Image: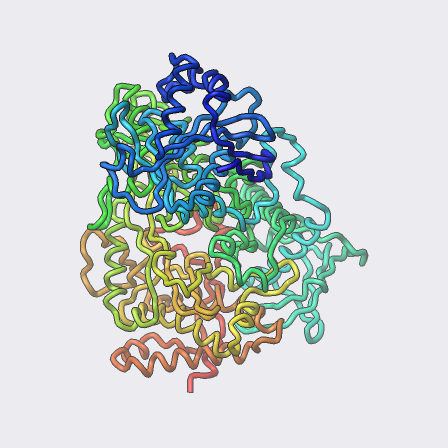
Amino acid sequence: MDHVTLQSPLLGQISFKPFLPDHDSSLLHSWLTQPYAKFWGMENASIDEVKAFYSTLINSGHETAYLGYINGTAQFLIEIYDVSQHEIASHIDITAGDIGFHILLAPNTHPIRGFSHDVMQHCMQFIFDEYHATRILVEPDCHNHKVHTLNLSVGFRHLKTVRLKQKQALLGELTKTAFNHSKQYANHLNSSIQLNHSSPDATQFASHIKTTHWQKANQQLIVKMITEFSHERLITPFELSTGSYLLTNSNEQVTYHFSAKQLPLDHLMIDASSLVKTNNQGEQQALDALAFLLEFASKLGLADQQLATYLEEVSSTLSSACYKYAKRSFTASELVHQSFQTVESEMTHGHPSFIANNGRIGFDATDFHQYAPEAASPIQIIWLAGAKTHTAFNAINDINYQSLIDSQLDLSEQLFFEKRLAEKGLLLDDYYLIPVHPWQWENKLVHLYTRELANNTLVCLGAGFDKYLPQQSIRTLFNLSKPNNYYVKVALSILNMGFMRGLSAKYMAVTPAINQWVYDLVLNDTTLSSLNFVPLRELATLGFSGSHYEDCQLGDTPYKKMIAALWRDNPTNLIDNSEQLATMASLLHQDNNGNSYIVAKINASKRSPEAWLKAYLKAYLIPLLHCFYKYKLVFMPHGENLILRFKDHVPVGVFMKDIGEEVCVLNSQDELPEEIARITITMPKELELLSIFTDVFDCIFRYMVPLLAQENCLTPKQFWQLVATEIKQYQAAHPELSERFAQYDIFCDEFELSCLNRLQLKNNKQMVDLTDPANSLQFAGKLANPIALFKD
């Protein structure tokens, strides 16, 4: 074969030329005799011996070699061989199209970031294209960790250790599918505002804070504050005339004028462009969300440190909004055609109810760019070894610890971690491998667990290879390198939206059992199965405990929630090729032009709005109703906690997340298994149906209605009539539950207004006691039930 040239955006021209022993052996000899090339076993060979070796190799008829040139300079050597003629043939089933491969890089005299990976990637492309390979096999020495990592970077997986004549080797394979995925997994992520780590500049941390972005962020957040605080009856705008409102603070120093429509559930649909602020002299003032909080602090019950902390959280939320406006983003009509994880990373609004929904107290500027979901920056997990005497592993019945770790870590990584422990005189069998967030390791664990690190109860093993994408919840991570692998959820001790985002080792102990109980209940219910309602099980957990922070004198503290992890089902494995996935939060998403994802999705489906919404209600609302009425089983069904499955852009089912921490059985008369008894919650009967009224009607549908109305897709009355019709049809189909329907009348005239922002304003560090959520609730009167009109 004559030489082949490929073009690299990073390196330029990469050429593959047949190795000529008489011409090239002297150069190759200078590489092979370097210390880094010791695994080739020719460090003491002469030039003549190198020439003889490669003459024999090339003349064998089943092996060949190429010298690789970059822009005309020799930079690497590759060997390609027929695996059926190689000793590895006795260790693996050989199929047509299998090609063996070795690589040696020239001495690194002028380092270029990404050089090795780029060369390796083009070598794989060369073999797949020119040799029509279906699979490439490698057998590096077990101790050659640099090559193992290089292999992983292009999609190889190492299958097992094998004993060859001259080495103990790791046998690895690369399929074309895996190779293509390794090139493309991050292609569609809008990670456009990345830090330049090679030449850090303090100004880049604020590059997204532009005047236009700041003005828009403040305008949008003040609109949201007026909407939500008036909804929760903390402030009361005055209607001057139909659709024209003003809001004045208590000392009448400032007034806000705006136009709005009053929608069901006491929701003001405010025209953001109409919002004007004036002082008591009638002079127009700049819109400033932080100033708004100070102006209405007494109404909000904020003062002193609580006010200062809330201002910090809101300021961070504004900065996050500016970042999102600065990103290159998809329009709504473009986004409906994007991949599952692209949609996930494009969510810009956070929780629809909470004002301070991106506080993230604990993150610095670098952390934001690295770990915030909207940054869409892939991260690598840090792995710790936790002594089995202090670490608990729990899983559903068909998962064991080793099978879990095999799915998470390549064999080469496991061997490398085992070597690191051995260097300390420790045995891998005495430890569990625990994934932790890199921020958690650097900012918390390395400081707070010095005793455990000193006595080797905990050992840091380093970063794993796989790249993960933070989901909207920040501490839940999706494996981009292996997109069919489990989600991983880890502790992240930052303060965000009313909670320190840790994970309790104690809670983790029974999480798999809770998940399996819920999963079995749902799976065996014919109604839920027919609606494609599927809980995403949290299959396995690890929790480290036994430190001084576990002492009972500390009480219930975030320090007890520092080191734990869980693994969750991946919905990509549970759908067929004709279906697509998207977070349900997308249905409340608007692009930078104000166009909504939900209307774009309806348009893409070619269905009428009524038909599309009927399908959505069957997929989302009806399963929640059925779980409540039949089992008194309730979830936390906000947008981020559900993943919608679509077929031709029409909803055909949902996946429910966060089972272990947030599922409850209300006032159960049935005796649950002792290990999962914590999910039984005692609650006043009149509040039980708030699991639908508050969590669905008020926290999802209230925001969906104005999106549909403003694009003339559906009127509020039409929407709520559709909801009522679907509920009636469900009730008619289940006469066996008629007593429950009467006992818990979903068509009642009104229900308690449960206020989320009041919770956060009262206690921003832990707004709900998870052991007694009913007593944490904050109420402010009642709301008229929007479906009561359609009862008969």
Q: Position of residue 637 (x, y in %)?
A: 41, 61
**Left or right: 68 as drawn, with respect to 523:** right
Q: In the rendered view, would you say 96 is above or below 333?
A: above
Q: Residue at x 37, y 63 (%)?
A: 576
Q: Position of residue 303 (x, y in %)?
A: 57, 45
Q: Residue at x 73, y 47 (%)?
A: 211
Residue in front for this viewpoint, 302 or 385: 385
Q: Position of residue 410 (x, y in %)?
A: 33, 37
Quarter of the image for residue 727 reads bottom left
**Left or right: 152 as drawn, with respect to 280:** left
Quarter of the image for residue 72 reads top right
**Left or right: 676 as drawn, with respect to 67:** left
Q: Look at the image and tell me whether residue 686 can be seen.
A: no
Residue in front for this viewpoint, 271 or 739: 271
Q: In the rendered view, would you say 550 is above or below 256?
A: above
Q: Residue at x 55, y 76 (%)?
A: 716
